[in-house]
Image (cartoon, rainbow, N blue to C red):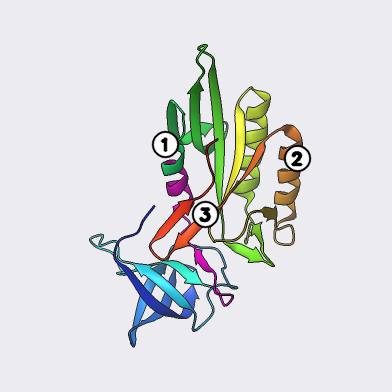
Amino acid sequence: MKYKNITRAVFLNRPNRFIAEVDIDGQKEIVHVKNTGRCKELLIPGCEIWLTAPGTPGRKTKYDLVAVRKNTGVLFNIDSQAPNKVVKEWLEKQNYTKVVPEYRYGESRIDFYMEKLDKDGTLHKYLMEVKGCTLEIDGIGYFPDAPTDRGVRHIRELMKAKEEGFNTALAFVIQMDGVTEVRAYTKMHPEFGIAMEDAKKAGVEILFLRCHVEPDQLEILRGKI
């Protein structure tokens, strides 16, 4: 996926989880932060960031903050809407006969439902829940960076669907280069780690979707599934 109207800026401050104060060529601007997570290890005063100007009429802010360069030099996409968008683009390039976003299953909306028809006419059904990973510690990705009861519930739904005959997957979109693995950040949310281990034992596939990040682009590098 690509962004339009990308502008480089410098991060100054984050008064609340929705907005940030930034410097664009010496001018202070209030921008929308497209990630309600903490991102404290990324959004440090003085760091290099990138903004996009969607041009939507009636907006309170002109820009969205979508990418930041960590003090290690690695570029991170922190747009919380990007993982589902880039996965949808990616799934549509695979050999599925149907890809349906926001599929109602049980008490939840699972991110994607897919179908695949074999040559012999056998129909295979898939459910995939997508999580974006923006937390990196010593070269390892971690999720979540804030407690997520919703995330735990979705994992439990995947386990139930697996029992009912679906092919199920929990997919982590790694929103940075150079990281190949995501672990449960049990320090932040122990229950998520327990649910993830239970899912593995139940046969839910755990996918680590490696990405390449540019200021104006997020691209999945993994091959076909």
| Rendering coords of residue 110 (x, y %) | 53, 38
The Cα atoms of the two marked residues, 3 and 1, are separated by 17 Å
Q: Are marks 3 and 1 in contact (CB under 8 Å)?
A: no
| Residue where numbered disc 2 is placed | 198
> Which residue shows up at 34% across the image and 59% down it?
3
Question: Is residue 73 within the magenta segment?
Answer: yes
Circle 1: residue type: Glu
| Residue in front for this viewpoint, 209 or 115 | 209
Residue 196, by quadrant, is top right
Quick one: which residue is furthest to the left in this view?
Answer: 57
Q: Is residue 14 magenta?
A: no
Which element is circle 1 on?
loop
Residue drawn at 39 percent across, 68 percent down = 32
Mark sitting on residue 211: 3
- Circle 1 is placed at which residue position? 92
Q: Position of residue 13 (x, y in %)?
A: 48, 80
Q: Which residues are magenta?
A: 70-88
Quick check: 163 above or below 52? above
Secondary element under disc 2, as helix, strand or loop, is helix
Crowding at dot 3, Cα within 10 Å, few <14 / some 14-19 / many 20+, comes out as many
Position of residue 201 measured from the top left corner of the image (x, y, whole percent): 76, 36
Q: Residue at x 61, y 28 (%)?
A: 167
The amino acid type of the residue labelled 3 equals Cys
